[in-house]
Amino acid sequence: MDTELPAITCPADLKALPLEKLPELAEKIRQTLIQTLSQTGGHLGPNLGVVELTIALHRVFDTPKDRFVFDVAHQGYVHKMLTGRWDRIHTIRQHDGLNGFLLRTESEHDCYGAGHAGTALSAALGMATGRDLAGGDENVVCVAGDAAFTCGPVFEAMNNVAAHTKRLIVVLNDNEWSIDRNVGAIAKYFNSIATHPAYANLHQKAGKLLEFMLGEDARRIVKKVEDHAKNILLPQSQTPSNRSSLFDEFGIRYYGPIDGHNIPLLIQTFEFLKTQDEPVILHIITEKGRGYTPALNDPGKFHGLGKYSVETGETPSSDKPTYSQVFARSVTDFAKADPKIVAITGAMPGGTGLSVFKKEIPERYFDVGIAEEHAALFACGLATRGQKPFLTIYSTFMQRAFDMIVHDMAIQNLPVRLCMDRGGLSGDDGPTHHGLFDIAYLRGIPGLVHMQPRNEDEFVDMLWTMAGYEAGPIAIRYPRGNGPGVTPKDKPVRLEIGKAEVVADGNDVALVALGDMFPVAEEAKKELEAKGLSVALINPRWIKPLDMDCISTFARKVKVICTLEDHVLRNGFGAGVIEELSDAGIRTPVVRIGWPDQFIEHGTPSVLRKKHGLSVENTVAKIMAALGQ
Ligand SMILES: Cc1ncc(C[n+]2csc(CCOP(=O)(O)OP(=O)(O)O)c2C)c(N)n1
Ligand SMILES: CC(=O)[C@@H](O)[C@H](O)COP(=O)(O)O
Ligand SMILES: [Mg+2]
């Protein structure tokens, strides 16, 4: 590799590079990503797939005047490297370092943040419409992956594009992968285009032709090739005169598919597209993980991961199963004995562990794509027919389905099992992914049961309780990663709903610690006892219904109650305890440990817990202060 490549400190540096140097730059970016992310972790596969695309975008367009809106924005590392953050890319997803997604507060080149899928096209349409209203002339480019198109809001946006603007450029980055392989009819449709021999062949020629023409005739050439190709490709059912792609039907002129790694072709195509006075979509074909064999061989693993060996692609293994693994094993075993149990995921079989269920009981496994609202409704329909749906969606992504939980699940009292992985701080992904609001958004819903285990054994008992619960919707939250390592018993037991576990009695202080905050309470108890205090320790188990017999009994005898939760304090578990004590006329002081009323930045749970007071020290200090000591 030529070491003479100058540093890229801004998009102007990229524009100053000779065209023939761009492949070398692409290689340098790839090597930087592979080396850097082996130490920081991150979304290696998606970013390796958009190196040439991002180079071409920054060659043709001018951010921050022109706007790039990336869907999910997990594939925004190359954009960051080309917009003045190359020298900080080694801090990606590290505390106080670069965020793993685009962030408006991080750079003027990041015009829109994300983290959750399906938002980019609507936001880009808003920007284009806002530009038109203001009489602006900037370009707006939406970059969305193939799986983003399984997301409802994308179709809601497409339904409006042609009515609102004449100038919008959409890039469909099609690598055939979501986190797992992309699913559903839309994935099949994209694949039918990308693999059609006539189209593929034409596009080889079109690509060559375009490269040769390099300019003003591009439009005529491309349009002629497109029309001809579409006449070959599209379903025979359509009359020859008005055959069009799905996108043309939405008023968005479709171009492609073209090779998403061919920089000159991409540049020429974007130069041509930016002259168009109609909304356009460019379908590019890319390889997720391109340039790194382990990632090409396992796009699912390398979609997003922690540290890995550059040489082998291997990642550190842990002998302790994660909550996700315990969940998937348990529900799969339950389902083997109960033919009514079905499992649903929103494009996250790996993260939720449900790839185990998919492998062992494929006929009752449903990956609906990035479609949490649909997943919840689909689960409701299943429940009306006597099925037992385990709707498995991260706490943060379940936010998408809130209305369905109220309107369809709770009002109709349907027995859907809501399994919310990543319940609590998510860590490196930051504020868009922390599962810190599910208690707040579920606690007010009448009739909905909600719980959290303090270890793996109790977790399986709770799942077993859910499997047998038919009285209405029931939810469980559990954290990312490992638990304390308590091996589940061979045969799980059904728990009494609304009944807490009193682990230790005490007369001065009662610690009521939910889920993965229980170990913090255990340590705080030791420190408080060392100060001569008598400390009760309660595992509440149930967020709703709260065991108020237990809690009020202790509240009447101790001097202070302390609740601990891996959730925001606002309308959280502790808030519920305060409400219920107040309703019962009990005035015992309650101190609460939990996340403050702000969005929590990215970083490791240990660093963030210490910084934001979810620590033993802060627990002890707040209790001692409440005791006036
Ligand atoms: C609402 C929502 N659900 C699930 C996810 C988890 N997720 C992150 S990226 C991704 C797949 C994105 O696939 P695609 O858009 O094709 O981009 P690629 O990674 O292939 O480049 C998923 C499911 C999310 N970010 N947002
Ligand atoms: C970008 C995205 O939303 C997912 O890739 C997410 O980062 C996965 O989170 P986990 O690593 O907790 O499974
Ligand atoms: Mg994809």
Image: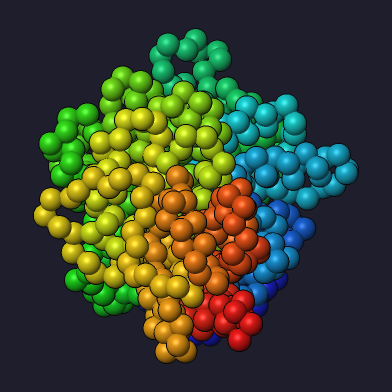
Work out whether residue 2 or residue 488 is closer to the camera in this orientation and state it: 488
Residue 70, percent from left and from top? 58, 53
Quadrant of residue 516 within the rendered picture: bottom left
Residue drawn at x 73%, y 49% as measured from the top left: 139
Q: Position of residue 220 (x, y in %)?
A: 62, 34
**Is the C terminus in the top left, top right, bottom left or bottom right quadrant?**
bottom right
Q: Is residue 611 above or below residue 130?
A: below
The residue sitting at the front extreme is 557
Asked which quadrant contains residue 376, the reply is top left
Left or right for 206, reference 597: left
Looking at the picture, does residue 65 appear above or below residue 420? below
Q: Residue 402, how many percent across, how many down?
A: 54, 38
Foreground: 336 or 520? Answer: 520
Residue at 30%, 41% in the rendered image = 466
Q: Is residue 118 left or right of residue 471?
A: right
Res 451 visible: no
Nearest the viewer among 31 and 87 is 87
Q: Residue at x 27, y 57 (%)?
A: 458
Residue 326 visible at all? yes
